[in-house]
Amino acid sequence: MTVGNPTTDSAELGGAGERIHLENVRKEFGELVAVNDLSLRIREGEFLVLLGPSGCGKTTTLRMIAGLETPTGGEISIGDETVTRTLPQERELSMVFQSYALYPHKTVRENLAFPLGKMDLDDDERETRIRRVAETLEIAGLLDKDPGQLSGGQRQRVALGRTIIREPRAFLMDEPLSNLDARLRVQTRAELRALQQDLGTTTVYVTHDQEEAMSLADRIAVMKDGELQQVGPPEDVYEQPTNEFVAGFIGEPAMNFFALTADDRPTLFPDDPVPLGTSLPEAAETVGVRPEHVHLASEVDGETPSTMPPFECGVDVVEPLGNAYEVELVRGTTTFTARQRSLPDNVATDATVDVVFDTDAVHAFDASGAALLEGGEVDG
Ligand code: ATP
């Protein structure tokens, strides 16, 4: 599907693309604090992804923006209007859920028309909107079919169409792609991104899938235990995580963490120490190294400037990924992962290899898990 069909001015479809501000928003369910003092400024037309593990408060946050939950404290505004206690229907937002419930006995056209029901539109306007949405999503040929006759991907598009057709002030999406198979999910994700950019409608999207977040978001807001950990563009959150949690949550394979055995210079691997070869702030307790910054030394000769002397490791497992290799390494009792684009000949299970870290790319964390070198924004 090419989103933004040349026969359609899809910009006309977009809502106002308004900003959404949350100020110190809190939600308690009895004793449980589901969302704790969340301040987040979502910009006009932005695609903001709320990311975090199950139970961290993402859905509750989205439901408070939608008006389906009332905050225990704090304020929510859309554009210049405070909406903290207004009814969902007065907020003019559109919400897409995991299960895209279409009316099974209505045609695609009737499903698309349904959200227009109470709007003050004449028949021509109604038909124009349906046509425009259907052409943008390339489902115009399906308008007279029933949902049962459609593929999962087509049904998802009809569900998206129902979201768009109302021309809301923002889209709120809660894991809308999770019912699709892996291939279709990646394809629909790209389409969704293109569509949102085309429409320019502010979008808040909930997921626990960091890869999905990285590929969709203008900015990612990472949450844990009801608290905002960091908000920033995907590359900032990846390259400058504010704490150990964000560093470990974002990135696949995950960042390697090493406890420092600190003397006067930082060393790693307590039972077989190796000097890190670079200085770290005094408070450093843990070092994080992404798998792509772990180099098998023979590969890296003359390429990666590293102040670290190579050290020997055993090769536990080599996993070919098609375009790269994941190598599980072990030194003493510590195991960690390298990601390599190509493998030197001598690298196979049970071999001994020389390893260096790209010391310019190491992350350091203090005892509380806070990043010590460069951290990104915590407050959105
Ligand atoms: P998931 O990805 O699993 O949906 P989430 O990050 O969206 O998780 P929420 O659904 O926002 O998390 O839930 C946050 C916390 O609030 C959880 O501990 C959950 O059990 C609790 N919670 C959510 N809704 C209610 C409710 N209506 N009553 C009581 N507790 C609730």
Image (cartoon, grey):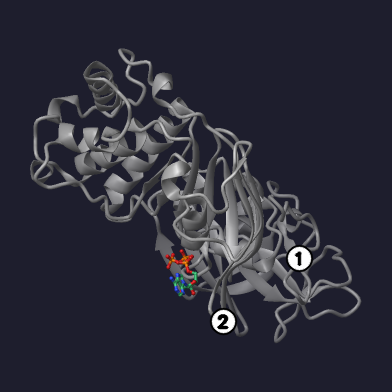
Position in image of residue 147 (x %, y %): 13, 43
Position in image of residue 2 (x %, y %): 32, 25
- The correct choice, above or below, for 314 with respect to 104 in the image is below
Q: Mark 2, residues whose alpha carbon is within 10 Å: few (<14), some, or many (≥20)?
A: few
Rendered residue at 60%/85% (across/down)? 333
263 on left or right of 85: right
335 on left or right of 157: right
Q: Mark 1, residues whose alpha carbon is within 10 Å: few (<14), some, or many (≥20)?
A: many
Q: Are marks 1 and 2 in contact (CB under 8 Å)?
A: no
- To which residue does mark 1 refer? 364
Rendered residue at 52%/32% (across/down)? 17
**Marks 1, 2: nearer the viewer:** 2
The one of 307 and 164 positioned closer to us in this rendering: 164
354 on left or right of 68: right
Which amino acid type is shown beneath numbered disc 1? Ala
Mark yes or no: residue 233 visible.
yes
Rendered residue at 23%/16% (across/down)? 124
Label 1 or label 2, whichever comes before in sequence order: 2
Determine the image quadrant of residue 309: bottom right
Q: Residue furthest right?
A: 264
SS at badge 2 = loop
Q: Residue furthest top?
A: 7
Determine the image quadrant of residue 259: bottom right
Which amino acid type is shown beneath numbered disc 2? Glu
The one of 237 and 33 positioned closer to us in this rendering: 33
Position in image of residue 145 (x %, y %): 9, 35
Rendered residue at 48%/70% (across/down)? 55
SS at badge 1 = strand
Q: Is mark 1 within 8 Å of ligand 1?
A: no
- To which residue does mark 2 refer? 31
Tell me the CA gap for discs 1 and 2.
35 Å
